[in-house]
Each structure stands twice: as C-alpha cells, then as structure tokens.
Image (cartoon, grey):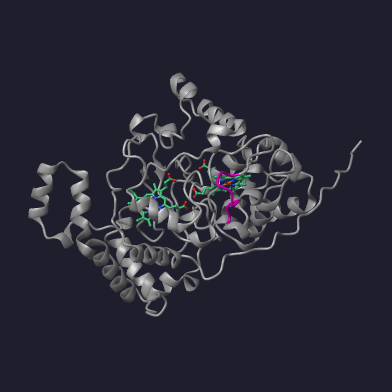
Amino acid sequence: MTIFKRNVIAAMLAALAAGIAGFSPAVIAADKPAAKKAVIAADKPAAKKISFPPLGSLPPVPVPADNPMSPEKTELGKMLFWDSRLGGDASSPCAVCHQPEKGWGDGGEISRGYPGTQHWRNSQTVLNSAYYNKLFWEGSVTSLESQAPAAAEGNVAGNGDPSLMEMRLRFIPEYVERFKQVFGSEWPRITHAYQAIAAFQRTLNSDAKQVPFDRFIAGDKKALSENAQRGMAVYHGKGGCIQCHNGSLASDQKFYSLGVPENDVFKTDPLYQITHRWEHYQKGVNEKDYRGADIDLGLYYITKNPKDIGKFRTPSLRELKYTAPFMHNGIFYTLDEVVDFYNKGGGAANWPNKTPLIKPLGLTDQEKKDLVAFLESLSMDKPLLMDPPKLPPYQPMKVTK
Ligand code: HEC
Ligand code: HEC
C-alpha cells in the first residue's frame, strides 16, 4: 500500500473512531463527575472529543537489535518450541499449551499445568504476541526473550532447571551444530535457546492478505459483509469497544477490571486452589490476601496497589475465530457470550476496581450479531497451522579417559 493511501485510510478510521454515533461524549461522561460532564459536552463538538489509535493492519513485526532474525534462527526456535527436553520431564514443551490447531493456545478454559499441578489461567495464543510490549494476562514481562524462561522454568508450566536443560541441549549433536551456526558459540546456551524461541514466535503473525478486515482497509470494499460493516460501526460507536481494543493489534495494552466472573473450578478442585495459593505466595502478597483471597488479583501482583486488583491486560482481538475460550480464566466459549457480557455492562457492579468505561450497552439482537461478524473479520480466513518439526536425537559424548 502506498503511504498516501495508508494515511487516507488511517485518517478515515480515526474519524470513524472519534465520531460514530455520538459515542465519544458518553465515554468522557462516564469518567468524570456530573458537573464537569456538562462543561465538556458544551465545550467541544462531539467529533473532536476523543480519538483512539485506529484499528489498522499490523506493521512489520518489531525485532530487538540484540536478537536479529534469520531463517536458521527461527527454524531452530521452531524445533525448541516443540522439544520436550526444554522442560522438567518430557511432558511440557511450549507446543503442548500452545498448539497450532487450538489457535496456539491449549483449548481449555484454564490451561493444563505441569504434571501434578494445574495452571490457573487461560493459555494465551502466541499469535501476534511479538507486538505486545507487556506479556501475560497481568503484563508481567516485557519481551519474548524474557517470557520464554518464565515459561520453560515456571513451576506450573515447563518446570525445567535451566542448567539441566542446557546440558541436555549439549548432548544433541545437531543442536550443537545449529547453535554454533546461529550464535557462534561452541556449546548451546540456554539464553540462546530462549532467543531462538522468541525469534520463531516473531514469525507467528496474522497475514494481512488473509484477514478480511485488513483487506477491507487496504481498499477491497467487498472484503467485509454488510453485517460486519455494521458491526464495525457498533464497535466504534454504541459498543464502545474501540476505547480499549484499539490500534493495529486491537489492544491498548492497558489494564482494566471488567468484573469477569470467577471460574468455578477454583471453588471445587484442590489442584486449582493449590496453584492459586502458590501463586499468591510466589508473588508475595500480604498474609491476609494469601489466606483469604480466592480471586485472581491480576495486575495487583505486580504493583501491590489495591487499585489494581482485578485488572488484566486488554488482549488483542485478532484471530479470535481460533482462540476460544476467552478471558483470563476461559470463562466464555463463544463471542456471543462475550458480547452478551459487555451488553449487560460487564460483571457485578461492586467488583473491585470495575472500570466505569464498561456500561450496559442496550444492543439489539441484530447489533450483537453484527458485532460478532465484525470481530470474526479480524481473523484470518484459515487458521495458521504447522506440522511439528522432526527433532534430533541425543548422542553420548566420547569418553576421553
Ligand atoms: C503448561 C502450559 C504452558 C506451557 C508449557 C507454556 N505455556 Fe505459554 N502460556 C501458558 C499460559 C497459561 C499463559 C498465560 C499465563 C499468565 O498470564 O499468567 C501463557 C502465556 C504465554 C505467552 C504470552 C502471550 C501474551 O499474549 O502475552 C507467550 C508468548 C507464551 N506463553 C509462550 C510460551 C513459550 C515460548 C513456551 C515454552 C518455552 C510456553 N509458553 C510454555 C501456558 C503454557
Ligand atoms: C475498558 C476497556 C475495554 C472495553 C471498553 C472493551 N474491552 Fe474487551 N477486554 C478488555 C480486557 C481488559 C479484557 C480481558 C479481561 C479479562 O480477561 O479479565 C478484554 C477481553 C475481551 C475479549 C476476550 C479476548 C480473549 O482473547 O480472551 C473479547 C472477545 C473482547 N474483550 C471484546 C470486546 C468487545 C466486543 C468490546 C465492545 C463491546 C470490548 N471488548 C470492550 C478491555 C475492554
């Protein structure tokens, strides 16, 4: 696309974001006390009030200067992503919880955990994860390079000891060769393994040519059905989704409490409760919360600010067709359920720190359907599938004496 065209479209969408259906003033109104509301409303014409970064096609994937991409590196990363020797026992490579045919998640409400444990959150898709600057539902790490060790070594995920995993890699001659070629090191190093995995994940992105919405904004007016086009207006207008799901990723990468109901497994299953307590312990909450709280405190674990209890990072809305169930605890299986949730104004009004940006929407059945059609248009026509790579075997080292 030419820069000119891109600018025109960006401007178009920005106008759309700011102006549709008199939605903007309502948003401001929700945030501020009544007295200010009137002033703001009288002050400026509605169209100019708020503009959000427009939805748009994803830019080229960002690559950190200290981990440049190469085909050899991403191929090595792909092997490691599937290799169960990166993990405690042979059960938990990245690919068991991030399966291509399950939208690169694990398909469960709450992710499986390392054997003998249960995870406590929904396994996120790794598709387009290279575009986030904060990873995980609570945004606790800031790069794919630092996310990989958290996953491979984290006790309820890979549960691998880094020095042991490194030793394993050194006993696989093909890896020794490949690490040497890619990183110039004599022996495989675990940090290089994480870099290769990060590089591989940077290749797992939505292909704009396959995404109806991306084709639409690139000029193909037939790419979106009429339903989806009406849904786009709901998204920017009456639905208010653009307030948080904005920019090319359809995520502002900020944190909000929506009052997503707790998943009942935490009330009934000891393994889930064990992880919950353990996470509280690991994340260093105070004793009262450690003993008493059986809800996921979200961003609070990072900041320890009570105002952050219940907040989670806004997820991207790309590829939702393939990534159900939804939300940090997988509580919703369909987009209809998600839209119903928003239409009711989110969860309980007294939920800790519930954002005022979420209010009952009064959508008609048709508007709800249209909105779902638009959400689906942000996914590729077909899922991104991939065959597992062939993994090289161990070989004993020559005994020198
Ligand atoms: C036992 C299951 C499990 C394994 C194994 C696992 N993950 Fe995950 N992954 C999850 C869950 C669950 C989350 C969300 C966790 C959270 O937010 O607390 C997640 C989150 C992520 C994210 C963040 C995505 C986002 O939108 O922020 C990335 C990237 C990721 N995993 C990559 C990996 C890689 C790479 C490996 C292997 C080194 C791996 N995972 C191994 C379950 C797993
Ligand atoms: C105030 C910010 C905000 C607004 C407005 C908002 N969302 Fe969200 N959305 C979030 C957050 C935060 C989450 C994750 C919440 C959680 O897991 O507890 C989320 C999750 C989702 C998910 C689940 C995605 C996944 O991968 O699990 C969907 C789908 C979604 N929102 C669609 C919408 C739609 C449609 C609208 C408009 C009707 C909307 N959102 C309005 C912040 C927002």
Position of 357 with respect to 160 (left or right) is left
Q: Position of residue 135 (x, y in %)?
A: 48, 46
Q: Is residue 63 above or below residue 299?
A: below
Q: Quadrant of the N terminus?
A: bottom left
Pick the front one: 327 or 126:
327
Whether residue 316 appears in this view of the structure is no
State left or right for residue 387 relative to residue 267.
right
Q: Is residue 217 above or below residue 52?
A: below
User: Could you tell me which residue is drawn at 36 percent across and 52 percent down?
Assistant: 342
- Across and down, in percent, residue 361 comes to 29, 54
Image quarter where the C terminus lies is: top right
Q: Residue lying farthest top? A: 287
Magenta stretch holds residue 3: no
Which residues, given as a range, are shown in magenta?
Answer: 104-111
Residue 379 visible in image = yes
Residue 63 at x, y percent in the picture: 49, 56
The residue at the point 71 percent across, 50 percent down is 83
Q: Is residue 149 above or below residue 267?
A: below
Where, by quadrant of the figure, is residue 248 drawn?
A: bottom left
Say which of 310 and 316 sits in front. Answer: 310
Q: Report the residue that reaches farthest toward the front.
A: 365
Q: In terms of depth relative to the viewer, which is nearer, 400 or 234?
A: 234
At 34% from the left edge and 53% from the top edge, which residue is drawn?
343
Residue at horizontal 15%, vertical 60%? 46
